[in-house]
Amino acid sequence: MAAAEIAVDRATLFEFLTRMGDNTLILGHRVSEWCGHAPVLEEDIALANTALDLIGQTHFWLGLAGEVEGKGRSADALAFLRDASGFRNALLVERPNGDFGQTLMRQFLFDAWHHVMLTALTGSSDPRVAEIAAKALKEVSYHLERSGDLIVRLGDGTAESHARMQRALDDMWSYVGELFIADETDRAIAGAGIAPDPASLRPQWEAIVGEVLHEATLKVPTTTYVHKGGRRGIHTEHLGYILADMQFLQRAYPGATW
Amino acid sequence: MYAQLVKSEGKKSAEEMSPEERAFQDRVDRGEKIEPKEWMPEGYRKTLIRQIGQHAHSEIVGQLPEGNWITRAPTLERKAILLAKVQDEAGHGLYLYCAAETLGISRDQLLDKLHDGSMKYSSIFNYPTLTWADIGAVGWLVDGAAIMNQVPLQKTSFGPYSRAMIRICKEESFHQRQGYDIMMKMAQGTPEQKAMAQDALNRFWSPALMMFGPSDKESVHSAQSMAWKIKIDTNDELRQKFVDQTVPQAEYLGLSIPDPNLKWNEEKKGYDFSEPDWTEFFEVIAGNGPCNRERLGARVKAWEDGAWFRDALVAHAEKDAARRAAARVAAE
């Protein structure tokens, strides 16, 4: 821990931690929008459970971010009182839910990244990061198993489900690359052994995703274009609306406790 | 709870019963549990299907008014608690549909009846959740009323229903506590928060009293259900218990119950209170509550939009089975 703090400054570590916590916060928010509207009762339960895990992980990541920052901001202050440009989530997780296939595809592509990332983070030089990663990994292993299984079943289901899943994959694909691009922060964090270089995760991610998509009879899109910006605070129009919902009470009644 | 106006049949006297019916009634009277494969009167089966089905539907429709505030919950902790609660409710729906299935009706059949309006869900879920305090009021009052009814139902005569109730009651008491805790925070909060809490109580009080169903005088179907131990207490008994329990809780919060006639009656050792507006109740049951169309519309839309998903899972399972069968043949 001490070594990590010497190796990178607080601002850099804070940046890394908000990237982790904002991904889980925004995806958790999106998933929770399904509550009561899923195609079958078991999916309502599974989605609520996934959202619950992600919100729980947010609490840890943003809690640590606030601690590292040292300005007295709690996880709640970070979640509810930053504006969109302060958010560091990847664009993928703020994509609208679309149909259930799009929600699942977004989840699967993210889960596969999340799983390889957390696995690497369990060996972080910062024990606080390693500890959160170990807890989250148990949950995310289940998320990946579930989303991967559904991708296979829907890809190799009916003609309609196949077409919907291929469309979902094509729509989401160009938002994935951002997760693997390293910037100054990532290089500093990797240099200190806190987290892996994002690019180094790509082969493992491709192995997981490739196998599932193959079994699902889905074609890997050929586009190489990458939409990016979320991880440095340049978001899509969607994030503003997410925050308008999420932050409403904290903004309308400043200083109230709930 | 969540079962109101469940139609049953008139109660039979001992002389009117067949020998089988008499033997069945004796078992119920002795407190034995009736299990799915055992003989039961057709009326018992039908009434239970209506009651358990209505209860299950209430759990799943009940996700909607609370789900309405998940994305706007004010802290990460409140969001997590609310998600956990709504997830529990979907789980309750699942146990209850399973209990109903043991009586020979499938979940899909029950859902069709919900969607076409021939089965109901509790009237309470046709009221909107307008502020965060409503989430507190729903937990405190709605789950509080539900517990009032469900605790005695743990002793109901039908085994699967009784066992589902035992599991459900454990979770419901956590739900009620979290609701009360939200109310507490708001009642002790800023003037705006306190006003929101009072407003939520004002709007939910009467609909919560309606959850127990019409007065015993009007409730023609109770006698048979009570003889069968499908219903344990009368509507008015439960309503009285609920009021007696809730008034001191409201006082502790510093909120006032919106009823000018509310008064302690020393003689009956309980509160006197105004009857809820039964005209409104029957309007809501008839489909004219503030949210009936939205709630049922949301469920129907979820079901229709999800058809491709459910079809695909079936198609995949069939393909998978065929592939495995072919592999077995090839191996032989």
Image (cartoon, coloured by chain):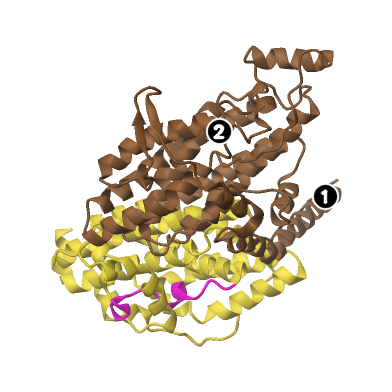
Residue B235, numbered circle: 2
Q: Is residue B246 left or right of residue A68?
A: right
Q: Is residue B16 left or right of residue B172?
A: right
Q: Tell me if mark 1 has few (under 14), some (14-19) or many (20+) residues whose alpha carbon lies within 10 angstroms of its own.
A: few
* Secondary structure category for the residue under label 2: helix
At horizontal 65% and vertical 14% (from top left) the residue drawn is: B29
When asked about the image quadrant of residue B230, the answer is top right
The answer to whether residue A45 is seen in the rendering is no
Residue B122, numbered circle: none
Q: Is residue B258 left or right of residue B21?
A: left
Q: Between residues B27 and A205, which one lies in front from this camera angle?
A: B27
Read off the residue under disc 1. B325
Chain that the image shows in brown: B
Instruction: Return the x and y of residue B316 as percentages of the image width and height.
Output: 74, 58
Q: Between residues B319 and B290, which one lies in front from this camera angle?
A: B290
When asked about the image quadrant of residue B304, the answer is bottom right
When asked about the image quadrant of residue A103, the answer is bottom right
Instruction: Return the x and y of residue A63 as percentages of the image width and height.
Output: 25, 59
Q: Which residues are magenta?
A: A83-98
- The disc labelled 1 sits on which kind of residue? Ala
Q: Is residue A32 left or right of residue B291?
A: left
* Magenta stretch encompasses residue A206: no
Chain-order first, disc 1 or disc 2: 2
Chain that the image shows in yellow: A
Q: Are marks 1 and 2 in contact (CB under 8 Å)?
A: no
Assign the C terminus of chain B to one quadrant of the image. top right
At horizontal 78% and vertical 58% (from top left) the residue drawn is: B319
